[in-house]
Amino acid sequence: MARELLPRDFATNEEIIQEARRRTTQGVWDYLAGGSESETTLRRNRAAFDRIAFRPRILVDVSKIDPSTTFLGQKLRIPAILAPIGSLEVFHPDGGVASTRAATEFGIMHALSSVTQPSLEETAAATPTPKIFQLYVHGSMDWVKQLLTRVKAADRYIALALTVDVAHYSRRERPLLSRYARPARDRSEQAKLTWDTLDEIKEFAGLPFLLKGVQTAEDAEIAVAHGVDVIWVSNHGGRQIDHARGSMDSLPEIVAAANGKARVIVDGGVQRGSDILKAVAMGADAVALGKMQGWGLAAGGPSGIVRMLEILEEELIIAMALTGITKMADVTPKLVCPADVVTPPHEMSSWVNMPVGRIL
């Protein structure tokens, strides 16, 4: 009988994903792994990374590599944060607390979703490290202010992220087919959000402000004009609008529109340490990890996430060394160039030993 793998035993993130599949029901797996409708946006997220090649430089002393960076005044061990995921408790009973503990142990930040368990206070108190609070607007402005009052009182959340790409919930057909039902939530207020609403929320919060769900230069320019501190390039991991561009395809025009007046995060399809290096080369300050976080959590709780991050870090260090980069400040657009895609993109196409298409 084969010995059960412990998180420290995982050799690759592929093993973590396979273990996550073994431990999750079909519905939970479909909720995490899938996208909306035809899953075109999901696949474009991967294709956008795959269309980028490195231009390695040689004869550089790369005996010492530092992959760390600073974001929102906090040092990150690698340029990544844990993205906000709703219903983390379906992957592990400790939910948001588990992700926060993993982020603290590894040395990055966690962005807590307002629709995950346990309470924001419990997650805040789980570790002493700073966190980001992500807001879905599921009530009136009085409701928002009551929630943000709790956020500020918790004294661990140093920034607020407002998600704006869910004006209407999408048709995510994988979980529909497996009849997986998520909690019903009132989305009418989310559909009413405007730039004026953003201003009111931002002013009341009084915290560094991240706008999550930006996909065009036009909206990035408006965000800068409204004093947004961080523009979060995201298509919700391919889980909202179908037939959108991959996040990395949207990134260059948004970086240009931000013009140094706001910092930039990108998510969607980040699965390798080399992806992180590509994102930084294309102008992002950091990436956010969604599916990878969920798979790590399902596979081994906080230790599963930490091991996933360790593997990403090793991949990142290798990519830096082999391209002649010793620290993040040296990464420039000259590190990368356009290239042909050689692998049909899907949610598992980063791992050549995975089955083509989704794991059932």
Image (spheres, rainbow, N blue to C red):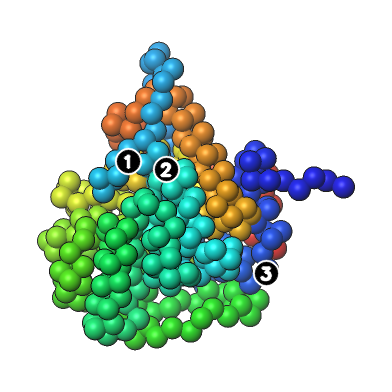
Q: Looking at the picture, does residue 17 appear above or below residue 335?
A: below
Residue under numbered circle 1 = 75
Say which amino acid is labelled 3. Answer: Gln
Image coords of residue 133 (percent x, y): 34, 63
* The quarter of the displayed image where residue 202 is located: bottom left
* Earlier-in-chain disc, 2 versus 1: 1
Residue under numbered circle 2 = 107
Q: Are marks 2 and 1 in contact (CB under 8 Å)?
A: yes
* Earlier-in-chain disc, 3 versus 2: 3
Say which amino acid is labelled 2. Answer: Gly
* The quarter of the displayed image where residue 59 is located: top left
Element under disc 3: helix
Q: CA distance from mark 3 to mark 2?
A: 32 Å
Apparent side of residue 356 relative to residue 63 in the rendered image (left or right): right
Q: Which mark is residue 26?
A: 3
Picture residue at 69% right of the left edge, 60% below the top: 23
